Amino acid sequence: MSRKYFLLMIALLLVSQGSYGQVLRKRTTLLMGGRFDITIVTQDSLSSEKNIDEVIAEITRIENLISDWKLDSQVSEVNQNAGIRPVKVDREVFELTQRAIRFSEVTNGSFDISFAAMDKIWKFDGSMTEMPSAEAIKKSVEKVGYKNIILDSIQSTIFLKIKGMKIGFGALGEGYATDKCRDMMLKKGIAAGIINGSGDMSTWGTQPNGKAWNIGITNPFHPEKLLAVVPLKQEAVTTSGSYEKFVVFDGKRYSHIINPATGYPATGLCSVTVFGPNAETANGLSTSLMVLGKKTGLLLLHKYPDYSCIMITDDGKVVQSKNFQIKKLKTRL
């Protein structure tokens, strides 16, 4: 389950000032190892810029807690002490880990934050000429397994039982960060905005002209075109996909998104977009659906009635959940 490839594009007519006297400001920056696009709507430019600064500060704070590539983060300390001792972490980090493990349980390991320990034996840069051996694939996930993550709620500690084991939040952390920043802005009474962390997107309010934010879903077979444009107000959206990162052996397409339980790449779907109230959950769902495939993935989604999805299969079939709000879509690309 390597880092996701994102297919979302914001199809917005971004106006600097609308008829409602509101001002929109947007800033792009690199945080948490990826691109963040922060859009804030307030009554004046200065206020918008100050709030963007606050959002960046909050994302940076979260990054310093959970980024496994920062050696002094709490998650890195957990990883460095795998097989040695439990590590006390902030309640925020503990509860994020707790939610991730619950998601692992409901997906039977199709989602697993301990994927960070997986050996990178699959290459998606054109250099692979044959599949790895079954033995190599099995060995690549030896240190992966959410059941070996031990949580102590009273002490607020995390312990990885196996030496060399690692956890990593990846894009799930980006979804968490976008949700946190949206909640922070709503509590301040900020009218509207979008926090977009590498495709994990939390929205609220409307554009300055009073219209909803329009989020475009890219056609994975023709990336210059949109499959659909979905209006959002206070909602989150994430996409997982593999249309640019995959390999083909014996006519079968293997995604760069790896099943952490088996070590084998996902097959069958090239794109999954999930809509719902929370980007953290939507991210976990979109990744899991890619691994589980169409049939099992839709069964999982039924357990989350506030979330809907649109899937695109490897052969171009468009599948949507019953509660997806746009009903008139092409059935095949």
Image: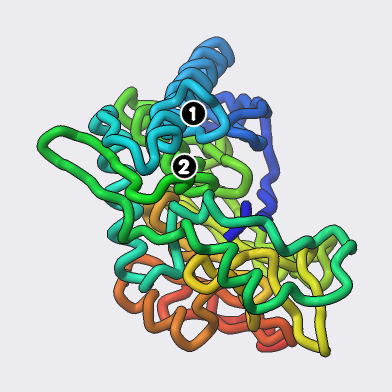
- Is residue 265 shown to the viewer in this render? no
Q: Nearer the viewer, residue 37 or 286?
A: 286
Q: Is residue 99 left or right of residue 299?
A: left
Which dot marks residue 173? 2
Q: Residue 231: x, y in percent?
A: 54, 58
Q: Nearer the viewer, residue 227 or 71?
A: 71
The mark that comes first in sequence, 1 or 2, is 1
Q: For the N terminus, which image quadrant?
A: bottom right
10 Å crowding of disc 2: few (<14), some (14-19), many (20+): many
The answer to whether the residues at label 1 and label 2 have Cβ atoms under 8 Å apart is: yes
Mark 2: secondary structure = helix
Query: Residue at (66%, 58%) from the top-left corner?
Result: 216
The amino acid on which the numbered mark 2 sits, given as a three-letter code, is: Gly
Image quarter of residue 74? top left
Q: Residue 71: x, y in percent?
A: 52, 24
Q: Nearer the viewer, residue 271 or 255?
A: 255
Q: Is residue 211 left or right of residue 135?
A: left
Query: Residue at (51%, 41%) from the top-left corner?
Result: 174
Query: Residue at (77%, 76%) from the top-left corner?
Result: 131
Say above or below: 96 vs 296.
above
- The Cα atoms of the two marked residues, 1 and 2, are separated by 8 Å
Q: For the C terminus, which image quadrant?
A: bottom right
Q: Residue 16: x, y in percent?
A: 66, 27
| Residue assigned mark 1 | 63
The amino acid on which the numbered mark 1 sits, given as a three-letter code, is: Glu
Q: Residue 295: x, y in percent?
A: 48, 88
Query: Residue at (66%, 49%) from the top-left corner?
Result: 10
Mark 1: secondary structure = helix
